[in-house]
Amino acid sequence: MSDEPGAAWIDREASWRLVIAPAFVAYAGLLALLGELKVDAVVVIGAFLVIAFAPRVKVARKPLLPFFAFGVIYDSMRLYMPTMHRLIPVNVESLYRAELALFGIRTADGRLITPPELFITHTHVVVDVVAAVAYFLFTFLPWAMAIYLLFKNRPVLTRYGWAWLAATAIAIVIYILYPAAPPWYVEQHGFAPPPLDLPGNPARLAAVDELLGVPYFATIYSRNANVFGAMPSMHAGFPLLAFLYARLALGRWRYLFLVHGMITCFSAIYLRHHYILDVIAGVFVALAAFQLTERAFRRLQR
């Protein structure tokens, strides 16, 4: 049994053998039946099963469970989001108009444009590369922090993982109730109702692919599970969440997560993936998830 606060059933071996691991396997089977089983899903589920049952690494399974659950929950959006978008149409113009009203920028010719539109013509290769690095680290920094905490501070890792999952749940509810097109969609298609099978787009990151001669970001965004999930921006939310927990365990290294979060917030707008409103919403989602998780764990400790 773990001495960390949490649901007791997660600690039981029977729960892993009869409930948790079979749920992951069942999801992989569903994807296979639908012809949607991708390599990344196989890797995530396979790694989870190794951690869940390999004797030498089983100690990592409970603190890392929320991160693996996040992977499955995020991936599953591509199965049901198109149906949800038929029920609740994607917002294209309303978010654009709100951004314009609150953060509109007056150009030399008198036009009012949104901040992402400003960066259609104001770009630089150095800024492109910095933004691309920030987006690349967005995927790997949280896992690096999780692995470090696994060995150095498992209680903080447990809270961090459940806060990450809470933020994901809050964000998905918003994605369902307020599906929103990103700035690059308005740039390329105007306010036309979007086709629900529209693939993701790397936007300004395509310039970095061209610079490197490798379609890295184009490949990543072609597998986007939720193309119309601009609001909230979890490119803003997840780095902030990482910083909030880095403060509790990483000493001076916590500033790395703060700097990364700030650069990523700017990059989300510069790359035309998000509006400022999306970034603000992502920050509030992270703060809400942090507060909810910390309060829940304090109650469990009492």
Image (cartoon, helix red, strand yellow):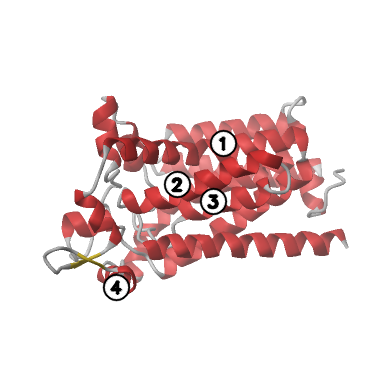
The spot of residue 126 in percent (x, y) is 32, 36
The residues tagged by marks 3 and 2 sit, at their Cα atoms, a distance apart of 13 Å
The residues tagged by marks 2 and 4 sit, at their Cα atoms, a distance apart of 27 Å
Asked where in the image residue 204 lies, by quadrant, the reply is top left
The reply to whether discs 4 and 1 touch (Cβ–Cβ < 8 Å) is: no
Q: Amino acid at mark 1?
A: Ile
The residues tagged by marks 1 and 2 sit, at their Cα atoms, a distance apart of 31 Å
Is there any visible trace of residue 169 in the rendered image?
yes
Residue at label 4?
94
* Residue under the point 51% across and 40% down: 28
Q: Is residue 187 above or below residue 92?
A: above
The spot of residue 81 in percent (x, y) is 39, 58
Q: Is residue 164 above or below residue 275?
A: above
Q: Amino acid at mark 3?
A: Phe
Q: Nearer the viewer, mark 2 or mark 4?
A: 2
- Local SS, label 4: helix
The reply to whether discs 3 and 4 touch (Cβ–Cβ < 8 Å) is: no
User: Can you say which quadrant of the picture contains the C terminus?
Assistant: bottom right
The residues tagged by marks 4 and 1 sit, at their Cα atoms, a distance apart of 38 Å
Residue at label 2?
263
Q: Is residue 112 left or right of residue 61?
A: left
Circle number at residue 238: 3
* Residue under the point 60% across and 34% down: 144
The reply to whether discs 1 and 2 touch (Cβ–Cβ < 8 Å) is: no
Residue at label 1?
45
Q: Is residue 64 above or below residue 89?
A: above
Circle number at residue 10: none
Question: Around disc 4, counting alpha carbons within 10 Å, would you say few (fewer than 14), some (14 to 19), or many (20 or more)?
Answer: few
Q: If you read the primary sequence from the N terminus, does the residue marked by circle 1 or circle 3 appear first?
A: 1
Q: If you read the primary sequence from the N terminus, does the residue marked by circle 2 or circle 4 appear first?
A: 4
